[in-house]
Image (tube, rainbow, N blue to C red):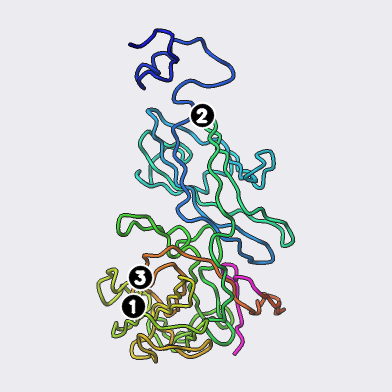
Amino acid sequence: MRSAALPALFCSVVMCAALVEAAPASAEKPGFPFEPQLEVLVPWEPTLVTSDGQQHLLYELQLRNFGQVPLVLEALRVVVADDLAAPLASFDAESLPSLFNRSGTRQDNPKPPTQIDASVSTVLFLQVSFAADAAVPPHVRHELQTTDGTVVTYAIDTRHDRLQVLGPPLIGSGWQAETGFSNNNGHRRGGLVLGGRSVISRRYAYDWIRVEEGAMSRGDDKVTTSYFGYGEPVVAVADATVVAVIDGVPDNIPKQAPVVPITLDTVGGNVVVLDIGHGQYAHYMHLQPGSIAVKQGERVRRGQQLARVGNTGDSHLPHMHFELTTSPEMLQGQGLPYVLDAFDVLSSDGSVSRRSHELPTQKALVQFGN
């Protein structure tokens, strides 16, 4: 037999909710459900990486509103995990909108991106930067201020993956990082749902295009051989094992639609994938047909020629796409950071600056050693 004096924790959820509604309002603790029903997930925890002389964390927050009414995100703080009073970065109502990509809603939705309707998901793309000599904590948390209250998240790592030091994927000078390290380009925000889970294999992907005096080609820009990068050697970034090779996809006509239908099998065109160890895979895409000089299962040495730059697959002009991921399967792994052991950055005034253990920034003009 149950006594009327039993505490409320023995009641059902419905009864508890009713008791909370009936109880006097408290200024100290909110009632059921106790905090905003905003789920915050980090699909892949970041690894601190250096670019342009600074340290960076590049990652996403997946937000889903499990409440019954819209929420508006008003502010976000990234804080030291064991000291919420120690902010590492802050984003306010003015800076937040540029960090959002919507999912589950039309991109032309007139509502502000910071408004998350009931049962809707969205993605927040973060880049948190630090000085080169800053002591970055091993774990961080997030404090999200909404119109319905504040959410403080679980802690995440800042050094989640092994950061590998790689050699260059190409040889020589004049290589422009058409898409490179950045928080706002099509690769960085090119998330897909494959196999029932969301992935961004291209989180740190590079499109390398060769330029001379600011131009990519000389002569007819509808001819592949007019491009300075076409046919240039592509080399292994590390001692590795070849785990996948795709060849036989024909070159596209530059600036025209691809000559083959684009599927998961053809999107990369001709491809070489290397297992570089520690569960990490280097993907080289859009390679010249017939130029692949290695086969599946072969061991290769750093600097060994693998193929040549082409214009195959989902490519509109000759270039080489490079990315490092957690999977040997095309686009199905999470994109991983790495650093190049050394490269030179060529400035518009002709000066050259040596970089070591960094990633080139987007649009950087780079010279690789032989």
Residue neighbourhood size for the residue with mark 3, other residues' Cα within 10 Å, grouped as few (<14), some (14–19), many (≥20): some
Q: Which image quadrant is residue 258 in?
A: bottom left
Q: Nearer the viewer, residue 315 or 225?
A: 315
Q: In the displayed structure, does residue 54 sit left or right of residue 231?
A: right
Q: Amino acid at mark 1?
A: Gly
Magenta region includes residue 366: yes
Mark 2 secondary-structure assignment: loop
**Position of residue 113 measured from the top left corner of the image (x, y, whole percent):** 46, 41
Q: Main secondary structure of the magenta part?
A: loop
**Position of residue 76 measured from the top left corner of the image (x, y, whole percent):** 58, 40
Residue neighbourhood size for the residue with mark 1, other residues' Cα within 10 Å, grouped as few (<14), some (14–19), many (≥20): many
**Position of residue 186 measured from the top left corner of the image (x, y, whole percent):** 45, 61
Residue at image mark 1: 269
First in sequence: mark 2 vs mark 3: 2
**Position of residue 163 measured from the top left corner of the image (x, y, whole percent):** 57, 68
Up the image or down, 273 lies above or below 89; here it is below
Residue at left offset 45%, top offset 70%: 279
Q: In the displayed structure, does residue 64 sit left or right of residue 51?
A: left
Q: Amino acid at mark 2?
A: Thr
Question: Distance from label 2 to label 1 (Cα)?
Answer: 47 Å
Q: Which residues are magenta?
A: 357-370
Instruction: Say which quadrant the C terminus sits in.
Output: bottom right
Residue at image mark 2: 147
Mark 3 secondary-structure assignment: loop
Up the image or down, 7 lies above or below 338; here it is above
Question: Distance from label 3 to label 1 (Cα)?
Answer: 11 Å
First in sequence: mark 2 vs mark 1: 2
Magenta region includes residue 183: no
Residue at image mark 3: 330
Q: Amino acid at mark 3?
A: Met
